[in-house]
Amino acid sequence: MNVLLMPFLYFPEDKSEYIPAAISFFFFMILLAITFNWIRRNSKKQEEETRELEERILRERREAREKQEH
């Protein structure tokens, strides 16, 4: 019964058939790590730019409020 439920599994007798799968796995893992680090760096850069923009807006509001009080 178990054989009928999993016909897509294939375990080759010749273990050298695993080599292309292992190479592609490691290639995509390296690509994943590079992409993940790029996204983290880009996100951190955008966060810093947003923080600077927010500080500038708050500073301009404070200055405008001070001008209105005087």
Image (cartoon, helix red, strand yellow):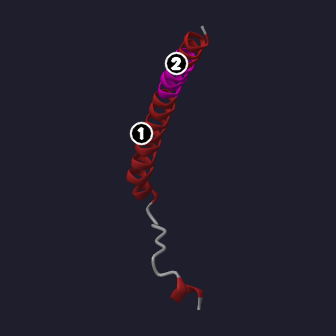
Residue at image x 46%, y 66%?
13
Q: Is residue 54 magenta?
A: yes
Say what secondary structure mark 1 lies in: helix
CB of mark 2 within 8 Å of CB of mark 1? no
Residue 43 image point, x, y percent = 50, 31
Q: Nearer the viewer, residue 20 or 62?
A: 62
User: Is residue 58 a member of the stretch shown in magenta?
Assistant: yes
Q: Position of residue 56 (x, y in %)?
A: 51, 17
Amino acid under label 1? Answer: Leu
Residue plotted at (40% across, 42% down): 27
| Residue ranking furthest to the top | 70
Of residues 27 and 18, the one drawn nearer to the viewer in this rendering:
27
Query: Is 65 situated left or right of 19 in this image?
Result: right
The residue that label 2 is drawn on is 52
Mark 2 burial class by Cα count in 10 Å: few <14, some 14-19, many 20+: few
Other residues around mark 1 within 10 Å, as few (<14) / some (14–19) / many (≥20): few
Image location (x, y in percent) of residue 67: 55, 10
Which of these two is toward me, 19 or 51?
Answer: 51
Quarter of the image with the N terminus is: bottom right
Q: Is residue 57 rendered to the left or right of residue 20?
A: right
Overall secondary structure of the magenta stretch? Answer: helix
Secondary element at tag 2: helix
Which numbered marker is on residue 31?
1
Q: Position of residue 10 (x, y in %)?
A: 46, 71
* Chain-order first, disc 2 or disc 1: 1
Stretch in magenta: 44-60
Which mark identifies residue 70?
none
**Number of marks in the rendered image:** 2
Q: Amino acid at mark 2?
A: Glu
Q: Answer above or below: position of 7 versus 47.
A: below
